[in-house]
């Protein structure tokens, strides 16, 4: 009983690892999973083919799991964040307790508005904020932060 579960787990993990290296869209993995599922139903009475197609379904489900976790809504702050530093303003609320280390304070900031060049966009998502001085912020405090925004 446990051996089939082990194989399913292995193929699920292989799908995750494979999807992390391939630049294939979510839709293509979804279509492949559906096709393998249909073929597994067609070959239900042929044991070896059925097992192969079920393992392929589980493989593609692992890939879909990874691709789904990487999808962001269009209004997410990650879609507006450049790879190089630009001066922007972010309006939102403190979403964690502030942590002071040395001369720097850090906290999680839940962004509600992205402001650049006098244009404001309603966004969602969180950023890790660093303030380069010792300061204490309360959980839920509303702030407007101005500075450089970097991708992790």
Image (cartoon, rainbow, N blue to C red):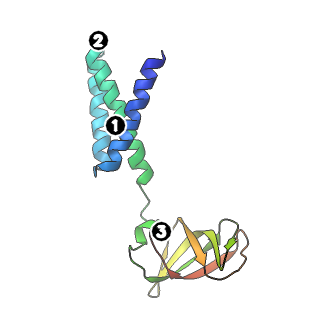
Residue that numbered label 1 is attached to: 60
Can you give x and y, in whole percent of width and height, for residue 144 in the image?
Answer: 60, 81
Residue 133 lies, in percent from the top left, at 65, 83
The kind of secondary structure element at disc 3 is helix
The numbered disc on residue 45 is 2
Look at the picture and state if 7 lies above or below 87: above
Q: Secondary structure at mark 2?
A: loop
Compared to residue 152, the image places residue 16 above or below, namely: above
Figure quadrant of residue 9: top left
Label 2 or label 3, whichever comes before in sequence order: 2
Please provide percent x and percent y for residue 32.
Answer: 27, 37
For label 2, the crowd category at 10 Å Cα-Cα, with few meaning under 14, some 14 to 19 and many 20 or more, is few
* Number of marks in the rendered image: 3
Label 3, on which residue? 77
- Which residue lies at the image location 73% right of the left edge and 72% below the top edge? 138
Instruction: Decide which of tag 1 and tag 3 comes sooner along the chain.
Output: 1
Decide which of 70, 116 is in the foreground and name it: 70
Relative to 132, does residue 125 appear above or below in the rendering?
A: above
The secondary structure type at the circle numbered 1 is helix
Picture residue at 67% right of the left edge, 65% below the top: 96
Q: Among all residues in the image, which is located at the extreme front?
A: 102
């Amino acid at each position: 009983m446990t051996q089939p579960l082990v194989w399913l787990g292995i193929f699920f993990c292989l799908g995750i690892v494979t999807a992390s290296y391939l630049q294939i869209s979510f839709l293509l993995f979804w279509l492949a999973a559906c096709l393998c599922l249909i073929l597994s139903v067609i070959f239900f009475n042929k044991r070896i083919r059925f097992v192969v197609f079920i393992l392929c379904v589980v493989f593609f489900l692992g890939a879909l799991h990874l691709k789904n976790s990487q999808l962001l809504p269009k209004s997410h702050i990650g879609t507006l964040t450049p790879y190089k530093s630009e001066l922007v303003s972010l309006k939102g609320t403190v979403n964690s307790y502030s942590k002071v280390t040395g001369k720097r304070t850090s906290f999680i900031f839940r962004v509600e508005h992205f402001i650049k060049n006098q244009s404001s966009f309603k966004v969602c998502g969180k950023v890790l904020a660093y303030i380069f001085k010792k300061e204490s912020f309360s959980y839920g405090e509303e702030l407007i932060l101005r500075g450089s925004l970097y991708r992790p």
